[in-house]
Each structure stands twice: as structure tokens, then as C-alpha cells.
Image: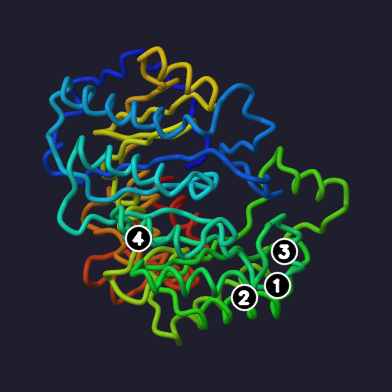
């Protein structure tokens, strides 16, 4: 998730307002566990991650116990707020590179969530992984611990593009780890990035075709966004790297959609394709549908019943708070009805399921004929009462949202 307003200070005991419990029995519940460690920092990355030289007192070896302490805190806070007791439907380990930790540490963290809150039948349990951070034995340990899914940061099959992105793995590593994951019984997703500085359409086509040849269940394709403050941003400003070409990025997206569709994948969110409904990322769908989730770890964000909060960012500050037995929450905001509706439109409009037109206000409904005429939403779907993006609409999704929310 992107930058949030400063909001108000979060209470040191993590307590939630009474409004958080309203309707909680009807909302799914998920956990996100942030592992903020990386061997090297990729030039394009502005996530809350730290290399070994940046930890300043925090210890990677202690992290699992610190995260488990926050899992225990989550139970106390939710019980005190009388939020409905619900088993966890999805768990997602992200980063950073979660698989820099020993597999047994990830297993302990997962089991803490299970033992504290319980899981739904067929709960989805995912970890991100760099291709060079796991082997078959590591993946088998994850499977035995209850993980169901792994998402590999492939990004590209072209060595020059990987070098531009400062990725540490080689293209040859990706099919190996995909094969190992499938062998032990994990669902597999691969992430791709398109529009890297200097990347050609032909190079992107090679990456998409390579990803398809590995036989994953799910593929995510994200447009490169050059974030201020990153190494890549500095390289572009100095002229060392060219700026990404938005028109070329659009061509790349269209190729990905065509190639993935031809291979039997269906898009279910602007940047995500799956071979079946069963292999979609239920965790990401929980975000897009406004479910409740608790984010564990430095800089992690949480949302329960319209209350959103975020943790202290540095691992050392996080470790200190957990050692003191206080909430790592730094700030929070209670979303008003207008903000919640705007965010619902922003997120749900990006999904293939779309939005019920009847649920939009009159101003937004008046925009429907123009959006159809501009080729941004599907006319037949609109006649059935759903706002669903066309391919052109997916490329211009932000414009559709602006039309709907003003």
C-alpha cells in the first residue's frame, strides 16, 4: 500500500474504537506478515526493507519471536474490542525477502497465527520468495508447515533487465524453483515487471513467454513506477538511465494480456492473471474487497472495520516496542463513510468482477454512458448492472476512478 496521511497517534495498547466491531462477523479476516530483510536493495524498490548494514541494533535472528509477540497482541486487542471471533482465511508473508529467514522461523510465525486465531478450511497461506533464496528442501519445509502457495519475484527473463533492476538471481534459476515448488505441492505465482529503463518490447515478450513456459498457476505483471528517493530515480535524473516510456508500457501490457489469455489465463484484477478461480490470490482479493486484516511487522499496515493503522518502520524501533510489551502502532485513522466509499470504488473497479452500478451515487451513474462511449467499460456488462473495465479501461483505470469519484 502507498503512503498514508499522518493521521492520529496510535494508542500504545493498540485498542480499537467500538465502531471496529460493527459488522465484523460478516467480514473475512486475514494476516499479513512483513519480513523487512533483503540481501541487497533493488534500485527501484521503496518498500520498507533493510540490508544487514542498515539494521542498527535489530537482529534478524530475533525477528520471528518479535512477530509472534505481535500476533499475541492482535488477539488481546480484538478480544478487548469485541470484534467477532473469526478464523483466518488468508496469510501472506511479504517483504523484503521472507525466505531470508530460516524456513522453521516462517513456520513458527505461521503456527502462531493458527494457534491464536485458527484457520478456515482450505486457508490460503502464501510467501513471497526470491528465486535465489530457496531450494527444494526449504520449499518442502514450508509445505509441511502448512503453506499452500509461493510467489516468486521473477521480474524478467532478460539478464540486462535484471541488472537494471539490481536483481540478484539469474534467469536460469526461475524454472528450477518453479519446478521444485510444484514438485512439493505448492501453487506457484511469478511476478513480472514491465517498462524498465531501456527494456524493449521484444525483451518483454521474451519474459512473458518464458514465464508461461514454466507452467505457473498465476502471473502478476506490474508496470514499473519510479519512486522518488530510490536509486533508480537518481539514475534517471542524472541521465544514467532513460525514463520509462508510457506508450511502450501500454504496448507491453497489451502483449501480456494477449499472451496470457491465449495460454488459458484469465485476468481478475488489472495486474493479475490466473489459470482458474481456485488459483487467484485470495489474499489480494481480501484487500480489494475491503476485508479486515492485521499487518505484522515494521511498517506493516492493518485495517479492521474502517480503522487503519501502521506500525513503526525501523526494525530496531519495532523490536523495542515488542520487548516493552506495547503496540508497535505509530499512527492511525478512522475512515469516514466518504473515504471508505472512494476506496471501495478505487479497488473494486480494478477487478474483473467490477462494481454494481446500483451501488454508485447518482453523479457516478451519470458518467456511465460517457465511459461506455470512450471504450473504458463494457457496454453489455453495464446493461446487466455491472461496471467492468475493457482492456482500454484497464490501461486507463485511474481515469475511470476519477470519473466515478469526482
In the current view of this chain or complex, which residue is farthest to the right? 239
| Residues at discs 2 and 1 in contact (Cβ within 8 Å) | yes
Front: mark 3 or 4: 4
Mark 1 or mark 4, earlier in chain = 1
Q: Where is residue 406 in the image (x, y as percent from the top left)?
A: 43, 45
Q: How far apart are marks 2 and 1 (CA)?
A: 7 Å
Q: How far apart are marks 3 and 4 (CA)?
A: 29 Å
| Residues at discs 3 and 2 in contact (Cβ within 8 Å) | no
Q: How far apart are marks 1 and 4 (CA)?
A: 26 Å
Q: Which of 405 and 304 is in front in this view?
A: 304
Mark 3 or mark 1, earlier in chain = 1
| Residues at discs 2 and 4 in contact (Cβ within 8 Å) | no
Q: Which of 99 and 154 is in front in this view?
A: 99
Front: mark 3 or 1: 1
Q: Distance between the residues labelled 3 and 2?
A: 18 Å
Tag on residue 281? 4
Q: Nearer the viewer, residue 351 or 37?
A: 37
Mark 3 or mark 2, earlier in chain = 2
Check disc 3 and report the residue beneath it: 245
Q: How far apart are marks 2 and 4 (CA)?
A: 21 Å
What residue lies at 53% left-to-right and 65% top-to-bottom? Answer: 221
Check disc 2 and report the residue beneath it: 207
Left or right: 59 in relation to 226: left
What residue lies at 55% left-to-right and 28% top-to-bottom? Answer: 59
Check disc 1 and report the residue beneath it: 158
Badge 1: few (under 14), some or many (20 or more) residues near its Cα, within 10 Å? some
**SS at circle 3:** loop
Up the image or down, 260 lies above or below 94; here it is: below
Q: Position of residue 171 (x, y in %)?
A: 65, 71
**SS at circle 4:** loop
Amino acid at each position: 500500500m502507498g503512503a498514508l496521511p499522518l493521521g492520529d497517534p496510535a494508542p500504545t495498547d493498540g485498542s480499537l474504537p467500538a465502531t471496529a466491531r460493527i459488522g465484523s462477523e460478516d467480514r473475512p479476516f486475514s494476516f499479513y506478515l512483513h519480513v523487512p530483510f533483503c540481501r541487497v536493495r533493488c534500485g527501484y524498490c521503496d518498500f520498507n526493507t533493510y540490508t544487514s548494514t542498515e539494521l542498527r541494533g535489530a537482529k534478524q535472528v530475533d525477528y520471528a519471536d518479535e512477530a509472534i509477540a505481535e500476533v499475541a497482541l492482535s488477539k488481546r486487542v480484538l478480544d478487548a474490542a469485541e470484534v467477532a471471533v473469526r478464523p483466518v482465511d488468508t496469510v501472506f508473508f511479504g517483504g523484503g525477502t521472507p525466505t531470508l529467514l530460516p524456513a522453521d522461523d516462517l513456520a513458527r510465525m505461521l503456527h502462531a497465527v493458527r494457534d491464536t486465531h485458527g484457520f478456515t478450511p482450505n486457508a490460503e497461506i502464501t510467501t513471497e520468495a526470491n528465486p535465489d533464496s530457496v531450494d527444494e528442501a526449504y520449499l518442502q519445509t514450508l509445505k509441511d508447515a502448512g503453506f499452500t502457495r509461493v510467489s516468486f519475484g521473477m521480474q524478467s527473463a532478460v539478464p540486462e533487465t535484471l541488472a537494471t533492476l539490481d536483481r540478484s538471481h539469474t534467469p536460469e534459476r526461475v524454472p528450477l524453483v518453479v519446478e521444485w515448488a510444484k514438485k512439493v505441492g505448492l501453487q506457484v505465482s511469478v511476478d513480472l515487471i514491465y517498462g524498465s529503463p531501456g527494456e524493449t518490447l521484444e525483451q518483454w515478450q521474451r519474459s512473458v513467454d518464458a514465464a508461461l513456459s514454466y507452467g505457473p498457476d498465476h502471473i502478476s505483471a506490474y508496470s514499473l513506477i519510479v519512486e522518488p528517493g530510490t536509486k533508480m530515480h537518481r539514475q534517471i535524473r542524472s541521465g544514467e538511465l532513460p525514463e520509462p516510456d508510457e506508450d511502450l508500457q501500454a504496448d507491453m501490457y497489451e502483449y501480456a494480456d494477449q499472451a496470457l489469455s491465449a495460454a488459458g489465463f484469465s485476468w481478475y484484477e488489472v495486474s493479475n492473471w490466473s489459470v482458474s478461480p481456485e488459483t487467484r490470490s485470495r489474499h489480494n482479493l481480501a484487500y480489494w474487497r475491503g476485508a479486515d486484516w492485521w499487518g505484522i511487522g515494521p511498517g506493516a499496515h492493518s485495517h479492521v472495520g474502517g480503522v487503519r493503522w501502521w506500525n513503526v518502520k525501523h526494525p530496531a524501533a519495532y523490536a523495542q516496542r515488542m520487548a516493552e510489551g506495547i503496540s508497535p502502532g505509530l499512527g492511525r485513522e478512522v475512515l469516514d463513510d466518504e473515504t471508505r466509499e472512494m476506496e471501495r470504488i478505487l479497488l473494486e473497479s480494478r477487478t474483473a468482477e467490477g462494481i454494481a452500478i446500483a451501488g454508485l451515487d447518482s453523479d457516478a451513474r451519470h458518467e456511465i454512458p460517457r465511459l461506455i462511449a470512450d471504450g473504458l467499460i463494457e457496454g453489455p456488462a453495464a446493461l446487466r448492472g455491472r461496471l467492468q473495465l475493457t482492456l482500454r479501461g484497464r490501461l486507463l483505470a485511474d481515469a475511470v476512478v476519477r470519473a466515478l469519484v469526482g
